[in-house]
Amino acid sequence: MKSDPDADAVSEPDADGFGRKGWALTAVLFTCVLVIPGIIYVYPYAAGALGFSFFQTYLALPLIPAVLLGLVAVWSMTAATRDQ
């Protein structure tokens, strides 16, 4: 008594590529890993144009990746659970 392998197979969703969520996450990770640290390394007084001192710059610029990653995490989780 052999079973048909196609009948037992679980249907998998179609691969639709990276999608909008994937590209948003990629852009945020690129910004957080390369752009903000690059700004801090190459031009540490970048936030000085906004009136920040040198030490305030080192506190404010790392907050940008933290906020971006937090917003993307919340957005992706709400988008993932909205479909259920």
Image (cartoon, rainbow, N blue to C red):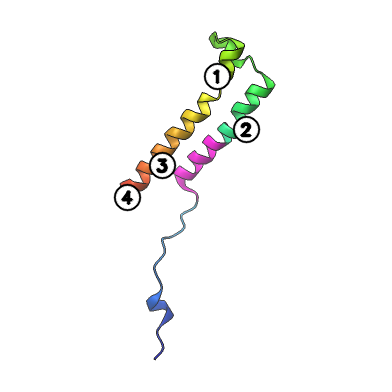
Q: Which residue is mark 3?
A: 76
How many angstroms separate mark 3 from mark 1 (CA)?
27 Å
Residue 11 appears in which quarter of the rendering? bottom left
Q: Please, what is the three-letter code of the amino acid marked with disc 2? A: Leu
Residue at the image point whose x is 67% and y is 23% from the top: 41
* Earlier sequence position, callout 3 versus callout 1: 1
Residue 34 location, x and y as percent?
62, 32
Assign the magenta stretch its main secondary structure: helix
Do residues under tags 1 and 4 come within 8 Å of each other at their CB atoms? no
Marks 4 and 3 sit apart, C-alpha to C-alpha, by: 11 Å
Magenta stretch in the rendered image: 18-29
Residue where numbered disc 1 is placed: 59
Q: Disc 1 or 4, which lies upstream in sequence?
A: 1
Q: CA distance from mark 2 to mark 1?
A: 17 Å
Q: Are marks 2 and 1 in contact (CB under 8 Å)?
A: no
Label 4, label 2: how many angstroms apart (C-alpha)?
32 Å
* Quarter of image, res 74: top left
Badge 1 element: helix
Labels 4 and 3 touching (C-beta < 8 A): no
Mark 1 vs mark 4, CA separation in Å: 38 Å
Decide: marks 4, 2 in contact (CB < 8 A)? no
Q: Is residue 66 left or right of residue 11?
A: right
| Tag nearer the camera, 2 or 1 | 1
Q: Quadrant of residue 51?
A: top right
Residue 76 placement, left or right of 29: left
Amino acid type at circle 3 is Ser
What residue would you read off at disc 4? Answer: 83
